[in-house]
Every structure is written in structure tokens, then in C-alpha cells.
Image (tube, helix red, strand yellow):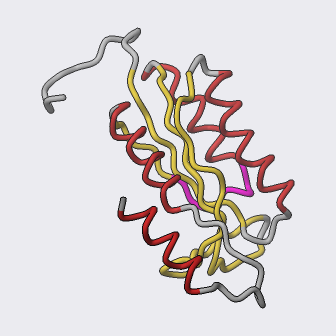
Amino acid sequence: MADTEVLEKDEISVYEAAFHIDANLSETETKKAFDSVKEAVVAAGGTPFAEALPTRMNLAYTISQIHEGVRRDHTSSHFAWIAYELTPENQSQVDEVLRGDKTIIRHLVTITTKEVAMYAQDRAAEKLIVAKPEGDAVSEQELDEVLEKTTA
């Protein structure tokens, strides 16, 4: 889209909301925070079509957050994103939920395309690796079989 192009009120845009959820939350609470963003998109009339579920990560720098007069420093978080279609007029409803949820320590909403969001979801799925429990040694034969599958 060119910089000078103006969207009509009822024209659909593709957004991506990326956000960091407090790492101190339980898995259930983390999922609840993720679902609340997704529900906000739907409530605003949007259609989610791609997502990355919350994944724990170390942050590149400390994020400080002050809530009710108490400062908390975050060095890790659960990172997630949701891509969705929505009219620009209704995007403010999603922004309010992202700003108002105290379990979300940082967020960013960008305008993107459906193709880019789907590509990002596919790339994230490729990176998922099922880890073997510690103590189970991998034989040379198993390693060779996996390598053959990935290069084929």
C-alpha cells in the first residue's frame, strides 16, 4: 500500500498483534491472557487467521512495569502473536484490551498482509522440535534417519 493511500472506514485491513505475557503466570493464566486478546479481536468484528501460541523466552533487555505503585522488572516472558482481519475503525477496541490487560507487559500492533502472516506461522511451525527426555541417547542410526528425512 502506498503512503498516500487512504483506507475507507469499512475496508478490511490485516493486523498482527505481537505481545509479551508475564512469565510468572501459570500455563493456564498465560493461555487465558492469550485467549482474551483473541476474543477481543472477534468481539470487535475481526477474523483471526494465523497465530503463534505463547512461548517462553528470555528478553534481550529488562522491561520494567509499574502497577499500583509497585515496580516489576521482567527478564523473560511468554511471547505470542495473532494475525487478523479487521476494519481500521474497530482496531481501537483491540488496542484497549492490549493496554488494559496487566498480564501483558509489552505489545505492538502492525499492519501486514495475509501472505506474510501465513508465512510467519508456517516458519514458526517448522521450528517446533519435540525434545526427547534427558537420558535417552540417540543412536547413530536414528540420527542418520532424521538427517535423511530433512535433506530429502
Q: Residue at x 48, y 80 (%)?
A: 60
Q: Nearer the viewer, residue 133 or 116?
A: 133
Where, by quadrant of the figure, is residue 66 drawn? bottom right
Quarter that holds the N terminus = top left
x%, y% of residue 33? 75, 48
Q: Is residue 31 left or right of 80 when viewed as pictured?
A: right
Q: Residue at x 56, y 80 (%)?
A: 141
x%, y% of residue 127? 50, 62
Q: Is residue 110 left or right of 90 when viewed as pictured?
A: left
Magenta segment: 101-107
Q: Is residue 121 left or right of 115 when viewed as pictured?
A: right
x%, y% of residue 77? 65, 69
Q: Residue at x 56, y 86 (%)?
A: 140
Q: Residue at x 53, y 29 (%)?
A: 49
Tell me if residue 69 comes above or below residue 9 in the rendering: below
Tell me if residue 66 comes above or below residue 90 in the rendering: below
Tell me if residue 17 comes above or below residue 123 in the rendering: above
Residue sticking out furthest to the front? 141
Q: Is residue 79 magenta?
A: no
